[in-house]
Image (spheres, rainbow, N blue to C red):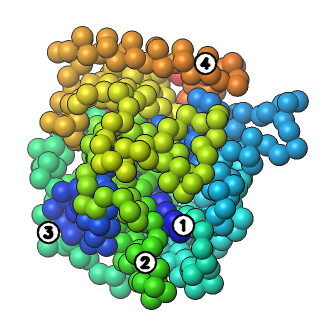
């Protein structure tokens, strides 16, 4: 069995052609979808980057791993303590470890563990290759070069799992200049209009809003001037076009890199015998909730990810509409590869459903975001209900409710009109939290640790500089609103 997993940072499904997008961003990925199974309703259990990949590669939710933040105590997995064996739980039961036990050679092409200092994430990989750059300097061409070279050396071997991580769709948007501007003459997404931008400029002023943009704590974005495709403020529709074109061009650039890798498989004569999977660590708000180019909430747009599985022997051209956690994918791959899903996992295999083309999935999902805001959401029926414990100074209601089928861009909050649905979601959330604590190896929900430290890492201690920035911009009324709503709240213990 040969398995190739393309892991694309910040990729939202609705910007891929196979999910109905109007722009031709993804011809290669679209072809894989036509030859395999496209999943409509897959959600990460934990956001953002590090908690998401920690959950997927451990098979466990963040509430059980403890690794839910990008800094602070809960950016590390729970310690195993005196009961730790010679080999840690991570080493014995990670996704790559389970595939190794099933007889597969495991390799990753990614700087992820180094980027986030999440070195436990590498557990189970026999070979680790890094593009040699970190964060915004990492490019798809470099990653593809490493993948093609690895396949030249090992592709014709039997039984391997290769994880290939692309970071290019994450800000800053930086496809090479010679890649051109493939979408410069194409219209923007239908939902995003001048009226939407005007509403955003008039009614919000939090981090990454249209009014605030990507401005860091020194009052200036370190992206400004360094990345021609990357806007930092949204004064007009020209800047909105830069955002959509920059994001979509990054997808097309990665899609081209994937095509190179698939071409190598074809040249080796193994393309048809190789399972190919495409997914992401999270989505990206591109104006939804007046959040631009960020993944800061537990909303539908951030938590919803693409999943395409082209697997030899499974149905082709099939669409799975059931609700799934992304961690269920890892369990499914293990079973399809002939392995055994570790007993401590939260992920549940849906391999039998795939073989029979009979989606069943989960009745509902509970989703957590603790790196920016502190939120938990419940995805059920056509709805997502989002509860904020700390909204990262984004001026959001404590509870939001959206119909993600009728309103995928979250423009109409239904919570005031449907208290019955809000209550239903609250009951599901409380039941989930009770179950998680009953099955936990540690008695503490990491949510409360993050809140005690002042909130998610990317929002921690940000309030004073945000208020100062508003005052400097002459937005004194908005600064006073922020003081009234947030000052002396959401502060770290001991502050």
Can residue 251 be seen by looking at this rendering? yes
State the SS at label 1: loop
Foreground: disc 4 or disc 1: 1
**Which one is in front in this view, the residue at disc 3 or the one at disc 4?**
4
Circles 3 and 2: CB distance less than 8 Å? no
Q: Nearer the viewer, residue 418 or 481?
A: 418
Mark pair 2, 4: CA separation: 44 Å
Quick one: quadrant of the N terminus? bottom right
Q: Indicate the secondary structure of the residue bearing disc 4.
A: helix
Q: Is residue 266 above or below residue 340?
A: below
Look at mark 4 in the image and give the residue it sits on: 437
Q: Secondary structure at mark 3?
A: loop
Tell me residue 218's x, y (percent): 53, 49
Q: Which residue is mark 1?
A: 1
**Residue depicted at 38% across the width and 63% down the height:** 313
SS for callout 2? helix
Tell me residue 391's x, y (percent): 43, 28
Q: Residues within 10 Å of mark 3 (few under 14, many from 20)?
A: few
- Picture quadrant where residue 353 is located: top left
Q: CA distance from mark 3 to mark 4?
A: 50 Å
Crowd around label 4: few <14 · some 14–19 · many ≥20 (10 Å): some
Q: Position of residue 100 (x, y in %)?
A: 68, 58
- Label 1, label 3: how many angstroms apart (C-alpha)? 41 Å
Residue at the extreme bottom: 267
Task: For the residues labelled 2 and 4, say whether their Cβ atoms are less than 8 Å apart.
Answer: no
Q: Which residue is mark 2?
A: 271
| Tags 1 and 3 touching, CB below 8 Å | no
Of callouts 3 and 4, the N-terminal one: 3
At label 1, counting other C-alpha atoms closer than 10 Å, the crowd grade (few under 14, some 14-19, many 20 or more) is some
Q: Which residue is mark 3?
A: 186
* Cα gap from disc 1 to disc 2, whole angstroms: 12 Å
């Amino acid at each position: 069995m040969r398995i190739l997993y393309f892991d694309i940072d910040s990729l939202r499904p609705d910007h891929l052609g196979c999910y109905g997008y109007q722009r031709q961003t993804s011809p290669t990925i679209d072809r894989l979808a036509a030859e395999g199974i496209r999943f409509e309703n897959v959600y990460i259990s934990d956001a953002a980057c590090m908690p998401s990949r920690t959950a997927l590669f451990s098979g466990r939710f963040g509430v059980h791993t403890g690794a839910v933040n990008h800094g602070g105590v809960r950016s590390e997995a729970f310690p195993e303590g005196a009961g730790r064996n010679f080999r840690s739980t991570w080493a014995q039961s990670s996704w790559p470890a389970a595939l190794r036990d099933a007889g597969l050679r495991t390799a990753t092409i990614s700087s992820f563990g180094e980027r986030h200092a999440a070195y436990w994430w590498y557990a189970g990989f026999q070979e680790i290759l890094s593009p040699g750059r970190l964060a915004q300097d990492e490019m798809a061409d470099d990653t593809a070069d490493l993948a093609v070279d690895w396949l030249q050396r090992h592709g014709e071997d039997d039984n391997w799992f290769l994880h290939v991580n692309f970071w290019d769709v994450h800000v800053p948007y930086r496809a090479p200049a010679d890649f051109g501007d493939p979408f410069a003459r194409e219209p923007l997404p239908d939902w995003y209009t001048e009226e939407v931008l005007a509403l955003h400029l008039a009614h919000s002023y939090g981090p990454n809003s249209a009014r605030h943009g990507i401005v860091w704590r020194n009052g200036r974005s370190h992206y400004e001037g360094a990345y021609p495709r990357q806007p930092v403020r949204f004064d007009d529709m020209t800047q909105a076009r830069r955002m959509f074109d920059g994001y979509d061009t990054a997808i097309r650039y990665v899609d081209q890199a994937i095509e190179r890798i698939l071409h190598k498989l074809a040249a080796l004569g193994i393309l048809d015998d190789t399972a190919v999977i495409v997914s992401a660590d999270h989505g990206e708000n591109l104006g939804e909730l007046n959040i631009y180019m960020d993944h800061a909430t537990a909303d539908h747009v951030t938590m919803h990810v693409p999943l395409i599985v082209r697997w030899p022997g499974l149905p082709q051209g099939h669409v799975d509409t059931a609700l799934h956690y992304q961690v269920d994918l890892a369990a499914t791959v293990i079973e399809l590869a002939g392995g055994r899903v570790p007993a401590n996992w939260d992920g549940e295999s849906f391999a039998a459903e795939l073989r029979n083309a009979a989606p069943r999935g989960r009745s509902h999902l509970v989703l957590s975001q603790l790196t920016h805001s502190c939120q938990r959401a419940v995805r059920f029926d056509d709805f997502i209900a989002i509860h904020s414990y700390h909204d990262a100074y984004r001026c959001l209601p404590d509870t939001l409710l959206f119909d993600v089928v009728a309103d995928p861009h979250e423009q109409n909050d239904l919570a005031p009109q449907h208290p019955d649905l809000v209550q239903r979601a609250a009951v599901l959330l409380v039941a989930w939290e009770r179950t998680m604590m009953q099955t936990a190896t540690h008695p503490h929900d990491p949510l409360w640790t993050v809140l005690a430290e002042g909130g998610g890492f990317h929002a921690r201690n940000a309030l004073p500089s945000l208020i100062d920035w508003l005052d400097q911009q002459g937005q004194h009324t908005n600064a006073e609103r922020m003081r009234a709503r947030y000052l002396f709240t959401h502060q770290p213990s001991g502050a």
